[in-house]
Structures are given as structure tokens and as C-alpha cells.
Amino acid sequence: MAKILVENREENKLVPLLRGILIHSLQEAGLSFDIAFEIATDIRSELEGTEVIATDELRLLVVKKLRAREGEEVADRYIKLKESLNIQVEQRDGQLIPFSRHEYQQALEAIALTSTEAMEIVAALYKHLIDRRIEVVSSRHLGRLTYRYLRQSSELGEDVAKRWLVWRDFVNDGRPLILLLGGTSGCGKSTIATMLASRLDIVRSQSTDMLREVMRTMMPEQLLPILHTSSFRAWTTLPGTGAEMTGVSDNLLVSGFRGQADLLTVAIEAVVKRALRERVSLILEGVHIQPAFMEQLVESDDAIIVPIMLGVMKRKQLHQRIRGRGRDAPQRRSERYLKHFDEIWRLQSYLLSGANKSGIPIVVNGDKEAVFSEIMRHVIEVLEKDFDRVAKDVF
């Protein structure tokens, strides 16, 4: 399809008609991504052969489509949105920032709401603001308004509103959040860590595999061979063993793993201490984060530390994950992991058993959205011990 240009006659500008921007503006009016995508696609198809369309003409076309498909209320909401309201949120320090529906939706998803639930609350909030022509709203008032809408929701209610209260109290407090994410090889730790970092806007993350890589450059294999092999093969470096041995007892497998993990403990502690010293949030993930180590770290007045043990409960599913990561990232050598799958599976049993004994939450990795929600529920549970103020004190 040839490029279509949109003409802003007031500013005498021509810009391309981008479907992504049109979708975003429709979502701002409260539509789901799927519906916004369909409408934007219909509009582009209808304009095929058009070289230039004025912004007013495009707006009328969008409104016409909305009235026909979604009804008068949605069309009116889009009109009000485009008529102008550039809503600004006044932060506690007096700074004004534009209100972003997408970012506010993510803030609500941080209290374990589904994307649909969060979108509905944001749409209700936005409608409240534009109906009253509110152009500047304080972050306190917006937080209080959100709390009210959550409480009044028949599907969400008091418990969810309480989670919002606890989360906002924590965010305003300024203490860092440190997430410790353990689990066996191939269970999805790095993927979940990346998602958490993105959703929670945490810029610092660290993998214990990377720490081991750094230590390997400092310690030659002849001096410390246990650092130069995978966690599930560390037992082959113990006295009286070797890579040529077939079959390994659980005790020997665990002894090798713990020997390697114990060597990394100093480096892991250093990463955590630096985050505490600099008061920055951190996600630390890796197989070497043992339950006993997690248990030692959780008590801190300087940060909120939340340990999570990730698991995949079906052998076939873990096997498929490891095979799949070889397709997605060949450098991760899935063939070698699959060759030693039994050791990886048994190592997971050890980690999950230790987590259970230590009271570390175990999260089953499956649907990413469900995993994110479950982790955030555990985070909120930990926060509730320190943050229990009422709404009038938080907002």
C-alpha cells in the first residue's frame, strides 16, 4: 500500500499515517488492542489510493467508524480526547508529567491485575478526568481516585484496593526492591527477570552465570575446576569423580552444585550490598541462588527483599523449554543440556525441596502474565509487613 500522508493545516505539516499511532489513539479512548487494530486496519484499507488526508477529515472518519462499531459513548470519548485534554500529573516535587494511560495500566498490573482489569480501571479514571475537563491532577488525588475505583469495582473490591494502597505506599517510601529469582537450568529465569525489569522499571539486573563467567577469567581451570563447568556437572570436578563417570547419586550431584554455588556466594552478596548501599532496585537471577542463601538475606531494614523459586513441574515441559531455547539462542548449547537433562531435573527437585523447607515461595512457570501476577502477589505480601498505612496517610 502506498504511503498516506496526514496534513495538519494549522501547523502546515505533512506526516505519514501510521497504523501504530492510530491504534494507540484508539486505545487511549478505552478500546482494547485487538479492536483498535481492526478499526485502524479498516481505516487504512478505506483510504487506499488516497495520497493526502486532512487531520479533521481523518478524525471524522475515525468517529464514523467508532459510532458504527462501538456506539455513541465510545465515539464521544474519542472526540473529547481529541478535542484536547492533555492531562498533566503533578508529582510530589511539583514537576508536571503527561498522564500516560499505558504507563498507568502497567502501574496497576504491578498489583497483580490482569491487563484487561487494569485497562478497564484506567479507562474509567480517564473518563472521570475528561468528563470533568481536569487538565492538571496531583499524583495524590489520582492515587486516591484509583483506590476508590478499585474499592467500588464489583469484580475487584477491597482486597485489590488494599494491594494498591500497599504498593503506592512502598513506591513513595523510596526503599529499593530486591528480587531474588532462583531455579534450575532452563526453567525460564532470565525471561521472567527481563519481564519483571521492564514492567517494574528496574534498570539493574544481574545473572549469577555472568558472575561465574567473571570469576572464571580470574581463576584458571587448573586452580578451581569447579567454576569451569555447568552447575549440573560440577560434581565431575570433585575428588574421586570425573567427566567419564556415568550415573551420579543425588548426594554427589548436590555436593557438586553446592560447592560451585558456595564459591559464588561472596560475589552475589557483593552485588546485593552494592544495591543496598546505592539504594537501587535489583533483580538477581540464577541457579546459584540457593534457598538457604535466600533465607539469610530476606531480613533487611534498608530494602524490601523478595525471594522466589521458579519451577517447571512437568519433565516433558522442561525438556521442551530447553530444546526451544536452543532454537531461539543457539549459543546456549541446548544439546548439552538435553544430554544431561536428568541431572537438571534432579537438581530442580533439590532446589524446590529446599525452598519448601525454607518457606520460599515457589512459582510454577507457565503463562508469563500469570507468572508476573503471582510474583507480584508475593511481593505485595512481603510489603504488607512494613506498609500498613490507611488511604488518607498514603494519598
Image (cartoon, helix red, strand yellow):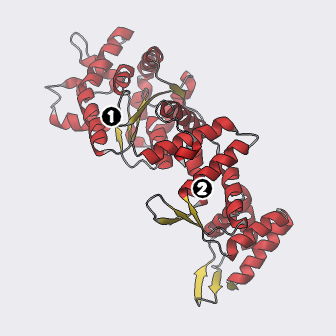
Residue 325, above or below 295: below
Q: Which residue is mark 1?
A: 208
Label 2 near label 1: C-beta < 8 Å? no
Q: Nearer the viewer, residue 326 or 101?
A: 101
Look at the picture and state if 382 lies above or below 93. Answer: above
Lateral position of residue 115 relative to residue 378, left or right? right
Q: Residues within 10 Å of mark 1 (few under 14, many from 20)?
A: many
Is residue 344 at all visible to an observer of this figure?
yes
Classify mark 2: helix, strand or loop.
helix
Image x and y of residue 274, in percent: 26, 40
Q: Is residue 241 left or right of residue 89?
A: left
User: Can you tell which mark lies on residue 31?
Assistant: none
Q: CA distance from mark 1 to mark 2?
A: 40 Å
Residue shown at 58%/51% (left/top)?
143
User: Quadrant of the rendered structure where residue 67 is?
Assistant: bottom right
Q: Residues within 10 Å of mark 2 (few under 14, many from 20)?
A: some
